[in-house]
Image: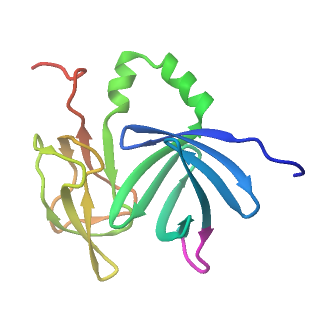
Amino acid sequence: MSGPERARKYAVVVGGDLVEVELRAEGEAVRARVNGEYFSLQLRKKEGTLGVYMLTWDDRSVPLWIKGRGRQYRVLWRGRALSLTVEPLRVHKLRERFRGRGAAAERDVEEVRAVMPGLVVQVAVQEGQRVEPGDGLLVISAMKMENEIRAPRAGVIERVNVKEGQEVRKDELLCVIRPEGPHEEVR
């Protein structure tokens, strides 16, 4: 492509929080503006791996495990599993504009899924329990390592789908977190 590429704007929803991202290609790197701050980014797949990437921004690097396609992605970063929805900002704004009230409440429910197969060795929460971002939900043993799955957002545990000693498959639903807020019904 000759000449400067125009910026592309995206809506990235992480745990119910919207982040607007603007990207512009600069050679092998990408110039990104996130919340008004500029970064130089590179995302490279690690050779011989399934879904493992190295994200480099400015002078820092972190490994990420990424799975997904289209709008929905799962990212494992520093032991935290994150659900991401990525779409062009214009499409996101249209979708939000036409979404009904019932769909908005449903959209806020966070499904926590297994990022890899393993054995549930500890369930640290129960239905009805309040959690904050980063609270431990459960521990899965996989590939001779114990991985603590943490809450991606604040809310109430609506459902726990697994128990200690249970084998889980990749992408299996572990639990559901319902946010507390003004849309919540009084019972």
**Residue 142 image offset from top left, x and y in percent:** 31, 75
Kindly report the secondary structure that dominates the magenta region of the rendered protein.
loop
Q: Which image quadrant is residue 58 in?
A: bottom right
User: Residue 117 vs residue 7: left or right?
Assistant: left
**Residue 185 image offset from top left, x and y in percent:** 18, 20
**Residue 2 image offset from top left, x and y in percent:** 90, 51
Q: Which residue does the image show at 55% across and 25% down from the upper left? A: 93
Q: Which quadrant is the C terminus positioned in?
A: top left
Q: Which residue does the image show at 70% across and 48% down from the upper left? A: 24
Q: Is residue 110 above or below residue 28?
A: above
- The chosen color scheme is rainbow
Query: Residue farthest to the bottom?
Result: 144
User: Residue 186 vs residue 71: left or right?
Assistant: left
Q: Is residue 47 above or below residue 22?
A: below
User: Residue 61 vs residue 128: left or right?
Assistant: right
**Residue 102 image offset from top left, x and y in percent:** 35, 19
Q: Is residue 12 magenta?
A: no
Q: Is residue 122 above or below residue 26?
A: below
Count of numbered badges drawn on the protein: 0
Q: Which residue does the image show at 51% across and 18% down from the upper left? A: 97
Question: Which residue range is magenta in the image?
Answer: 44-50
